[in-house]
Amino acid sequence: MERRAEAISQLRRGVLEFCVLALLREGERYSFDLVRALGDVEELVTSEGTLYPLLGRLRREGLVDSRWRESASGPPRRYYRITHAGDAALETFTHQWGRFRDSVDMLMNLGATT
Amino acid sequence: MTARRLHPLAEDYLRRLRRAGSDLAPERLRELLLEIEGYLADAIPPGASDDEALEALERLGPPGDVLEAERPGSATPDTDRRGTREWAAVILLPLGGFVFGVGWIIGLVLLWSSRLWTVRDKLIGTLIIPGGLATAVMVALLGAVGTAETQECGGVATQLNATTGAVIKRGSMHCTTTGAPSAATTAFHIALAVALLLGPILSAVYLARRAGRPASLTLRGAPLVGGGVWSP
């Protein structure tokens, strides 16, 4: 049971970075809004705080970049946006994910009807 | 910079995060704290109750979870992934041949079972040079035997008068030397020795470097959109 739970957790972790990139496709976003938007999606994130290290990794890999803006009401706010490399990675994933999802769905449905 | 104070529970959370994350690189920890502070400032409005603050902290997750995601090794693509298997292979391939040849074979098994090398890398590791440096030593020993000069000497002994000791007939001695290598052969042997010695060393260095390359190499150095205040 433990191993299966870990497998699901890994699957979630694997797709999460592309969900971040997808949310940034429309334009730059304040990190809090980004994190909350992902946290609001069911089954995706258990601890919203773990998204900050993920954003850091995406930054270091050049898939997103960021800038700080002063805020009148609190600490400075960090804004993120997607880069060309991020766009390319997202496009590749979208293509692969579609095929992956269809294949898994096909097998799941087969199992359900027999 | 902070225009208002955070909720006491949020302040306490940041303190725990700072303490538990003291092993992180200072710059990483500073950035993480700044972002989490921003999260707490927005998630817990001024005058929020303890219950509201706790609810926000629950969504954020315990400091341990956040730090676990930040620490290298948690699927960080730019960490060095070379483990015992890879280092053992890199050492055994050039040197393992001296251990009755078995060491090289173990190195070979480790090389082919690692996922950090491509088939091309593995072929290079296998073919340059089978047996590693021990092959160079073997070839050198065999070469020494095969090309050794042989000198054959023959002749007749000096004949002396048995009673007077006077020389009757002076003897003669002549030697012939065979097997002395020509200049071209010598040059070939030197080139072969250099290749056999350098091959395994360069091959091991190449494998060590290839295994150490980051998984996301192709994403590195990608042009960043815009400049100015935007930074990766």
Image (cartoon, rainbow, N blue to C red):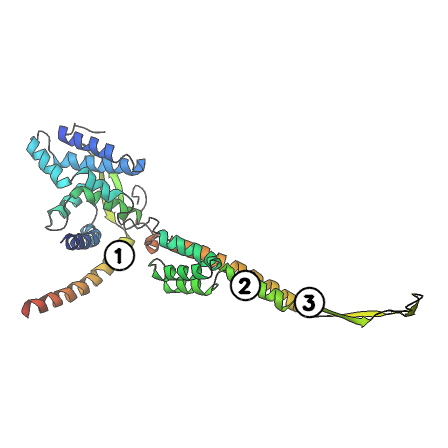
For residue B76, above or below residue B170: above
For residue A86, above or below residue B41: below
Q: Which residue is mark 2?
A: B138
Alpha carbon of mark 2 to alpha carbon of mark 1: how far? 51 Å
Taking B181 as reference, is B34 left or right?
left
x, y percent for residue A73 = 16, 32
Q: Chain of mark 3?
A: B
x, y percent for residue A50 = 20, 44
Alpha carbon of mark 3 to alpha carbon of mark 1: how far? 67 Å
x, y percent for residue B181 = 67, 68
x, y percent for residue A20 = 20, 50
Q: Quadrant of the C terminus of chain A?
A: bottom left
Taking B74 as reference, is B120 left or right?
right
Secondary structure category for the residue under label 3:
loop
Same chain for marks 3 and 1? no
Q: Chain of mark 1?
A: A
Q: Which residue is mark 3?
A: B149
Q: Quadrant of the N terminus of chain A?
A: bottom left
Question: Of the residues under marks 2 and 3, which one precedes in the sequence?
Answer: 2
Q: Nearer the viewer, mark 2 or mark 1?
A: 2
Q: Amino acid at mark 1?
A: Ala
Q: Amino acid at mark 3?
A: Glu
- Look at 10% across and 35% down and name the residue there: B54
Q: Chain of mark 2?
A: B
Secondary structure category for the residue under label 2:
helix
